[in-house]
Image: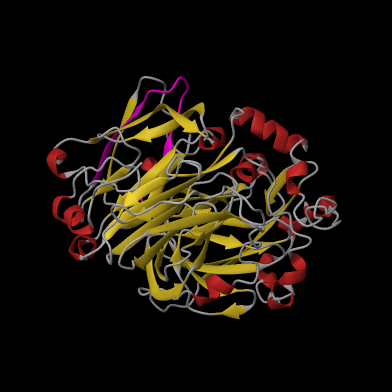
Amino acid sequence: MTHHLSRRGFLATSAAATAFATMPVVGRAQAMEPLLLRATTRTLDIDGRAATVMGLLGPDDRPGLALDPGQRFAVRLENRLEGETLIHWHGQIPPNAQDGVPNLPLPPIAPGESRDYDFTPLPGTHWMHSHLPLQELGLLAAPLIVRRAEDLAADRQEVVMFLHDFSFKSPEQVMEEITSGMAMHGMDHGGMTGMGATSGMDHGAMNGTPGMDHGAMTGMDHGSMAGMDHSGMAMTADLNDYDFDAYLANDRTLSDPDVVQVEPGGRVLLRVINAAAATSFWIETGAVEARLVAVDGHAVQPISGRRFGAAMAQRLDIEIDLPSGGAFPILALREGAPERTGIVLASPRAQVEKIQGNAPTAAPAFDLDFGQERSLRATQPLPERAAERRQMVMLGGQMQPYVWTIDGKTWAERQPVPAVSGERVELTFHNMSSMGHPMHLHGHVFQVVEAGGQRFSGAVRDTVYVPPMAAVTVALDAGEAARWMLHCHQMPHLASGMMTEFAVAAT
């Protein structure tokens, strides 16, 4: 597929292009009416084979929504699926009743029904997805872009790169294979299949974790564990617990990639969204130097490079200054494996070469040494303020049986993490398992303030990756008094119990 849209034409018109990657502004003409967003099914061509998946289609029948600066999130969500659904607006801070978690507090939307939403959105690169885990495995997700005034003023073309992992099997069958151990063969990356989730740790003993004195634990030396030799850790970590049939960028594989037409010598803002259910990716810009300018929708001091990491649910804004002409693949490499996907930025009449779906060598394990996270600095950090509450959040679990926990408990027996509205809270995620966990908190943004025992003023985020046998501390100001979800965004982990509540009480 080729797109004919220059950066200046895009900015001048904000018109709908024919491609997934270049999202239009859809709100001006419909400012008085809610934007219609449909949860429905659609058909994809995956390497020549038809696949029916779920999707979220906006008023223009394309995936997702893009809003103007200052435009309200006024949306009517219509359920055209056969079963009930509910959508979470990931990265946004709506009133709790509009957050999109089933029965917290509102029930899902029945087939054929709709529900209206109306709140002031946070600007940046965000996304939306079902909070029913099997539906997210079924690709019920889409971009949610909220532009800033400077985005419209900037002389650059915006391109969205939306990543998925995909199986021809039903989500129910995928989960059955994962939880029953049938998918364990997919974890043989460097001889790791013989390792237990915590290398032989007595998981039964972990059930006592919530009873320990978490207040006393906040002073322990996390650096002694998190600062261990992660080059050796990579041989014991379980990097991936399922081999998917395909990895998609804008609904396509590299056998027929999304080719986005760009202006020779122009500047591109690449909005990368990792919507994969169970895969972390490295984003590689190849022949072109790039700058990471935002994570999870929040600006950071620019970092130059050609490889940037995005765990599940994380987003990257990457600025690229293109050469005078040519075709430039932007690839997403699956963590610890050779599979890859991507898009191509191509100037008019450029020759687009065939790209193999597998790289010659496996990509490295994801950011185990916090190299990227420690280098990020928010351009607008949280105001300096002493923490009034510090809480340890223990992350545990195992592959056999497939159970993942927070503070030793699954969702069914959860112990909420408490806070009071207005408090400055520090949460330390201490991962005692050998799989990494992208931890997401609803209804809030937080700042990363410590990783692997090193204190720093890091990025503002809504999802932070916690490597195996490591600890990360985030600071936040507790918001609306309500029950907010706190969970791992690796969907099989969430579905198997790694979810709790951040229970905010009124002052």
Give left or right: position of 41 versus 27: right
Quadrant (top left, top right, bottom left, bottom right) of the C terminus:
bottom left
Observer able to see residue 308: yes
Q: Residue at x 61, y 55 (%)?
A: 359
The segment highlighted magenta reads: 73-93
Residue 282 drawn at (x, y percent): 55, 60
Q: Residue at x 30, y 67 (%)?
A: 324
Instruction: Give the quadrant of residue 16.
Output: top left
In the rendered view, tell whether residue 61 sits above or below residue 354.
above
Is 170 included in the stretch rendered in magenta?
A: no
Is 91 included in the stretch rendered in magenta?
A: yes
Residue 302 drawn at (x, y percent): 39, 75
Q: Residue 199 or 405: which is nearer the viewer?
A: 199
In the rendered view, tell whether residue 377 sits above or below residue 194.
below
Q: Residue at x 37, y 55 (%)?
A: 345
Give left or right: position of 471 versus 186: left
Quadrant (top left, top right, bottom left, bottom right) of the N terminus:
top left
Q: How many marks?
A: 0
Residue 132 drawn at (x, y percent): 52, 35
Q: Residue at x 65, y 39 (%)?
A: 412
Q: Residue 200 or 45: which is nearer the viewer?
A: 45
Observer able to see residue 421: no
Q: How is the image coloured?
A: secondary structure
Residue 96 drawn at (x, y percent): 39, 46
